[in-house]
Amino acid sequence: MTPGPAVARATGLPSGSVPWPPRAIVRRGSGSWTLQATLHRRGLGPVAGVDEAGRGACAGPLVVAACVLRPGDSAALDGLTDSKLLAPATRQRYFALLESRAVARCVVAIPPAEVDALGVHVANLEGMRRAVAGLAVHPGYVLTDGFRVSGLTAPNMAVVGGDRAAACVAAASVLAKVTRDRIMCDLHERLPRYGFAEHKGYCTMEHTEALVAHGPSDEHRFCYVNVAVAAQHHGWAAPPRPVARAGSWADVVQNGGPTAHRFDDHPRDDTGDSVPEPMTSPARPGGARSR
C-alpha cells in the first residue's frame, strides 16, 4: 500500500513512491506494557499516558496526570494497574516508585470553580492538555483513557479501559488518584463537617446527609444536581459563581441530564415532579454542557 498525494507533498517525494511502514499488531491479553513497547519500536516514543481522578465527585478538584515511563521498567512496576483496583497502601507504594522512576510526570488540579465554569467534560479535556504540555519530556505519542482529546501537542489515541490496558495510563491514574486523595484529606482538616477524608468528595449517602445538614461549601461543584438541590434547600437564590449552561437552578445539569430530584419540602406538580421557583442567576449563559 502506498500513500496518497498529501503524504507525498509532506515528504517531497513522488506520489506513490513512499510505502507505509508495516502495520504493528498488538495482541489482546499480551500485557499492559505491550502497546507502549510497540509504539517505541515504531519510533513513536516516548509514550505518555494521561488519566484523571475526581470526574464523578461533587466536591474538590478534578485532578489530571500525565506520565512517561521507561520502556524497560515493567519489572520494577509489576502489578501496576487502574488505581481504583489498588488498595490505598499499594497506591501509595506505586506513587513513590513513580516519583523516583518516571521519565516525566505532570499533575494538574482544576479547582471546583473552573469545573463549574467549563463543565466537567470540558474541564477534563483542558486538564489533559495542560498535563501533557507540562511534561518535562515532550512525548512522541499520547495514550488517553477512554476518549480522544483534541489539541494535544503530540499524536494521540484513546484506549478503552486504558488504565488497565496501558501501563503509562495506569501510572497517570495512580498519580492523579493519590494526589487528589491527599488534597481531599487536607480539605477535611479545614471542613471536617463534610467528611471529605472518608468519601473524597464523591456522592455517598454520608456526603449527601452532610450537604443536607450544612449546605454546600466553596469546595463543592454547583454544576452537580445534588449540590444545587442542597443549596436551594438552604435558601440560596442562585449559584454563587458562573455555572456552565445554567441560567437558573433549574438549568443545572449533571452528566448531560436536567435536575431530576429535589428535597421533599419543594412544591410538586400533578405528575409528582418538583416545581422550582423562578430564579435568576449570575451563571454565564451558553457555557459547555457538563457530562
Image: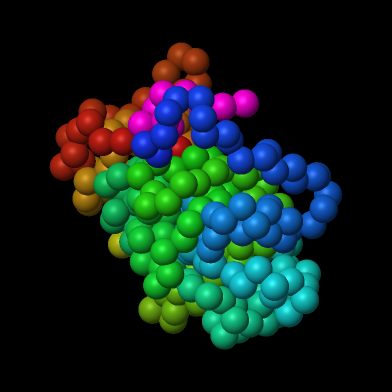
Q: Residue furthest right?
A: 29
Is residue 123 placed above or below 183 in the rendered structure? above
* Outermost residue, top side: 270
The residue sitting at 41% across, 64% down in the picture is 138
Residue at the image point whose x is 61% and y is 59% from the top:
40
171 and 114: which one is in front?
Answer: 171
Its colouring scheme is rainbow
Q: To which quarter of the image does residue 101 belong?
A: bottom right
Residue drawn at x 44%, y 43% as measured from the top left: 149
Classify residue 44 by image quadrant. bottom right
Residue at 45%, 38% (x, y): give it. Answer: 291
Q: Is residue 231 visible?
A: no
Asked if 87 appears above or below 223 in the picture, the reply is below
Q: Is residue 4 magenta?
A: yes
Q: Position of residue 148 (x, y in %)?
A: 49, 40
The verdict on residue 179 being magenta is no
Closest to the observer, 271 or 65: 65
Region rendered in magenta: 1-9
Where does residue 78 sit, x and y in percent of width and height? 77, 73
Location of the N terminus by quadrant is: top right
Where residue 56 appears, as percent x and y from the top left, is 52, 50
Name the one closer to the observer, 142 or 202. 142
Q: Taking the image as drawn, is residue 38 in sight?
A: yes
For this view, does 117 lie left or right of residue 187? Answer: left
Q: How many marks?
A: 0
* Residue 216 placement, left or right of 168: left
The foreground one among 154 and 286 is: 154
> Residue 164: x, y in percent?
71, 55
> Is residue 81 found left or right of 11 in the rendered image?
right
